[in-house]
Image (cartoon, rainbow, N blue to C red):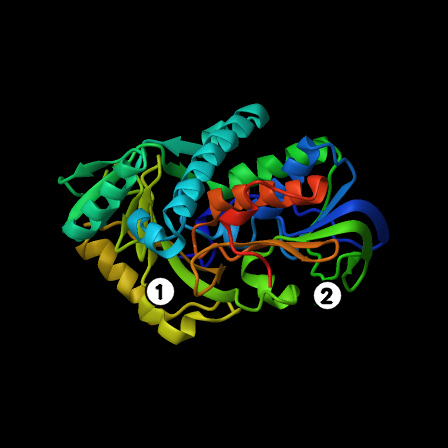
Amino acid sequence: MREVSLWLDEPYEPRPSLDEELACAVCVVGAGIGGLATAWHLLERGVRDIVLVEADVVAGGASGRNGGFFIAGAAPMYDRARELFGRDRARAIYAATLEAQRSMLAIADEIGARDAFRLGGMLRVDEPAAVRAHLDALHEDGFEGSLVTDLPGALHGLGLLTPHDGSVHPARWLRALARALEARGVRIFEGTRVQAPVGGSGVRSDAGRVRAGAVVVAADAALGALVPGVEHVRSRRLHMLATEPAPPALDCPVYVRDGHEYAQQLPDGRVTLGGFSDLDGAASWTDRDETNAAVQSRLDEYLRDDLLVRAPVSHRWVGLVGYADEPLPTVGAARDRLYALGGYNGTGHVQGFVAARIVSELIVNGASRDAWLYRSVG
């Protein structure tokens, strides 16, 4: 059994760390979906001189330690999102993430990474009343979804299938995106931890410095520690495991209890499972990626008793993600020439792409028509 993310357990040659002084138009901190997508959007808007620095490796943080889900919308179920954010805002967020899904798949086609994605829907399982309320809200606003009564394993309740959703091998997709960015001139440095707090004129590490016309911090769990005014984004650990190949058990990715548990089965038969952050309780609020044995034991039970999967566990890991009391990402200008995006509450892969577009528009145009969708910085 390996204590490493299944997504990251593949051969990889790290890039050099920053050990000199550089100058650029924009410096991006973080090589997960938010940072890489920001660089992509900036290139598409004519910004050519971009340096990207990453404390670990590409996809080494939350983007490579998550459940590998590719889903539209904000973190809460859609009816709850309308209550929390207002109907117009919730509908606009959902529409923006649907468009982001299409854009991400088009980019993946362009860079030869389309096989990292699998589409076939996602199943949300919950109490029948909660599922019906979610579905009714989706249909009222013109979005797709259908009820499913034949649930996998020994799961109870009612299912809601959203056909546009699916899954992604996050490390393969993002590392292909990083290579495509480098082919277009972006300079990427790994193993480069920047000093806090970050300012808008550049960043420093122990061995190097980048002077920049603008700085973007796309660090999710570390956002509150790096950017003044974003202390409401806190680092939280989420537990996951993966199994050896098992007989067919899951036709598509599954969310249970509004995402408290989440699982999928890969083409090779492996099952990945995460959840029970509520069992972790106050201990989940940490910036250390140590596992809680009680949570992992509960995942073992759920794998066996609810999903009816008997295959041995091969991997266990923790991902550190950014959470806030208001389950909306934080996106925007922190101060002159300093921008931030993160705090996705565990649903960052598609929302991070939207947030990156917003920040790129703010940098290039001084405004974004979608800036109102997410929480402003500070």
Residue 277: give its label.
1
Look at the image and tell me whether residue 155 can be seen.
Answer: no
Viewer-proximal residue among 95 and 178: 95
Whole-percent x, y for residue 237 in the image: 45, 64
Is 142 left, or right, of 232 in this rendering? left
Q: Is residue 195 above or below residue 56?
A: below
* Residue 264 found in image quarter: top left
Looking at the rendered structure, the kind of residue marked 1 is Ser
Residue drawn at 49 percent across, 71 percent down: 286
Residue 234: give its label.
none
- Secondary structure of the residue carrying numbered label 2: loop
Q: Is residue 229 above or below residue 346?
A: below
> Could you tell me which quadrant the N terminus lies in?
bottom left
Residue drawn at 65 percent across, 64 percent down: 226
Residue drawn at 29 percent across, 49 percent down: 79
Whole-percent x, y for residue 217 in the image: 65, 55
Looking at the rendered structure, the kind of residue marked 2 is Gln
Is 328 left, or right, of 110 in this rendering? left
